Image: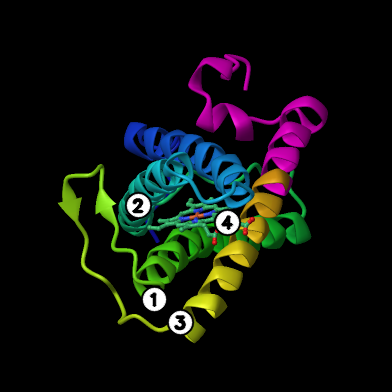
Amino acid sequence: MPTRPAAYTRTAVWLHWAIALLIFAAFPLGVYMHGLALSPNKLRLFNYHKWIGITALLLAVVRLAWRLIYRPPELPPTMAPWERSAAFAMHLFLYVLIVAAPLSGWLMSSATGFQTVWFGVIPLPDLIGKDKEFGRFLVELHRNLDYLLIALVGLHIAAALKHHFFTHDNILAQMIPFLRRSDR
Ligand code: HEM
């Protein structure tokens, strides 16, 4: 079996932070714009939200492909078997959700009859035909997936901080290279 690399590739680190940033932009914007009364401003924010979300989806697909080609570094030997299983399950769910959440937004836009034009320049194909009833279901699905995604991101951050400040291993430093300690 091939041995694991000592660190993530630079591309994997870049993709990780770019996707994180886009999720942290899309989520609060989605919550804010949803509560607005219909106005040109609301429609403008819907477009910004869709552009950010589609960019996140694109990078998530690249990230997934990258992950299949380049194996991540080994987890620290101090981690108990249950911690390894929990980390594996968490990462798997996150990979699924960073694709499923924005994809549900795209599907919803198609079903509700609002085509997505990426950055106002590239018209994306509608993934499904207009369907009011299914559109309503997809609005709910998009919301639920978004809240699940942000909850798991919260847990993921809490676990990373626990490893850095309490377990004192190199897990967080693998994604933030300037945190790397020379003694580990
Ligand atoms: C990482 C990606 C994304 C995140 C985290 C995200 C998050 C959210 C959140 C939190 C809401 C508010 C839900 C609510 O309170 O009901 C929302 C609404 C919305 N999202 Fe996304 N979204 C993402 C991607 C997308 C994409 C790719 C599209 C379409 C191309 C999209 C289209 C919409 C639309 C149209 C709404 C408004 C629904 C409504 O108010 O009826 N989203 N999104």
Residue 143 percent across, percent down from the top left = 61, 63
Magenta-colored stretch includes residue 177: yes
Quarter of the image where the N terminus is located: bottom left
Within-10-Å neighbours for mark 4: few <14, some 14–19, many 20+:
some
Q: Is mark 2 within 8 Å of ligand 1?
A: yes
Query: On the image, numbered disc 2 is attached to which residue?
Result: 54
Within-10-Å neighbours for mark 2: few <14, some 14–19, many 20+:
many
Query: On the image, numbered disc 1 is attached to which residue?
Result: 111
The residue mark sitting in front, 4 or 3, is 3
Kindly indicate whether the residue at mark 1 contacts the one at mark 4 (C-beta within 8 angstroms). no
Tell me the CA gap for discs 3 and 2.
Answer: 22 Å
Place residue 171 in its image quadrant: top right
Say what amino acid the circle numbered 4 marks. Answer: His
- Mark 4 and mark 1 lie on one chain; the one further toward the N terminus is 4
At 44% from the left and 59% from the top, the residue drawn is: 102
At 33% from the left and 57% from the top, the residue drawn is: 61
Say what amino acid the circle numbered 1 marks. Answer: Ala
Question: Quick check: 148 left or right of 68?
Answer: right
Query: On the image, numbered disc 4 is attached to which residue?
Result: 91
Residue 148 percent across, percent down from the top left = 66, 60
